[in-house]
Amino acid sequence: AQTVTQSQPEMSVQEAETVTLSCTYDTSENNYYLFWYKQPPSRQMILVIRQEAYKQQNATENRFSVNFQKAAKSFSLKISDSQLGDTAMYFCAFMNPVNNYGGSQGNLIFGKGTKLSVKP
Amino acid sequence: IAGITQAPTSQILAAGRRMTLRCTQDMRHNAMYWYRQDLGLGLRLIHYSNTAGTTGKGEVPDGYSVSRANTDDFPLTLASAVPSQTSVYFCASRKGASTGELFFGEGSRLTVL
């Protein structure tokens, strides 16, 4: 079974600085998707960034980037120029793609989350 | 605005009562999911539906049931609520197999006393 591990329950960073959130996963699959979701105090789950395992290039979305190390099964999130609005829970998630026969559930497997606080 | 609507947003319930959490999406997504979120445990899958008329069990299905009579609706029922079912419940749908992204509702906070 696939598992996702976030080893940092809580982190803090000063505004405008850079922070990296760690995530490791375990799978025997070769093709899959990885995600980082943000959950601010409003409780809404917001997609931050997505990575397809077959792509060697690390995904980037504005101030958010990932370091995807497939062999090491590592998927860390780097937040540059941290802003107060980045304060949130961050969840790393893994997904098996749905195959042509629909055998896979296609659901997300989540880590336990990292609570990030950005301090002024 | 297109998306997923969950109801109620919050509910306090006596143990032993029956409760249905509603979930409706207007994006015509085939796959839908119910997760529960508990502090320190992240989100765990309760039940899923790959398409209308089919459902499946997730990681923590005991005490819950679902139905998928049509594409848009995916209600979650607690037949006889227990305090351990106190949680925040999220409904989600999947845009497509090629992207893998899940879209989430705003969650329903349920407290069972």
Image (cartoon, coloured by chain):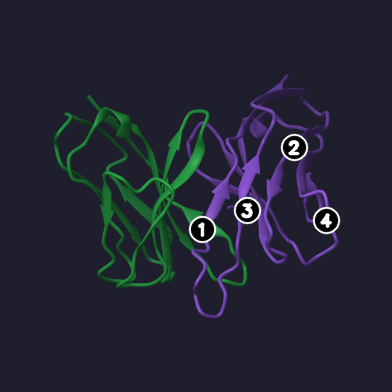
Q: Residue flagged by tag 1: what amino acid is it?
A: Asn
What chain is tagged by disc 4? A
**Quick one: SS at disc 2?**
loop
Residue A29, labelled with which disc?
A: none
The residue that disc 1 covers is A107
Work out how far the residue at label 1 is from the one at label 2, CA to CA, in angstroms. Answer: 21 Å
In the rendered structure, the answer to whether residue B109 lies left or right of residue A80 reads: left
Farthest residue to the top: give it: A120
Snapshot quadrant of residue B26: bottom left
Are discs 1 and 2 less than 8 Å apart at CB?
Answer: no
Q: Earlier in the sequence, mark 3 or mark 4?
A: 4
Q: Residue flagged by tag 4: what amino acid is it?
A: Asn
The residue that disc 2 covers is A22
Residue A58, labelled with which disc?
A: 4
Work out how far the residue at label 4 is from the one at label 1, CA to CA, in angstroms. Answer: 23 Å
Farthest residue to the left: give it: B17
The residue that disc 3 covers is A94
Q: Nearer the viewer, residue A43 or B20?
A: B20
Work out how far the residue at label 1 is from the one at label 3, CA to CA, in angstroms. Answer: 8 Å
**Quick one: SS at disc 1?**
loop
Residue at 62% in and 72% down: B98
**Both on one chain, marks 1 and 2?**
yes
Q: Earlier in the sequence, mark 2 or mark 3?
A: 2
Residue at 49% in and 64% down: A105
- Residue A78 visible: yes
Residue at 41% in and 56% down: B33
Q: Residue flagged by tag 2: what amino acid is it?
A: Ser
What chain is tagged by disc 1? A
Q: Can you give x and y, in whole percent of width and height, for residue B84 in the image?
A: 31, 30
Q: Nearer the viewer, residue B106 or B91?
A: B91
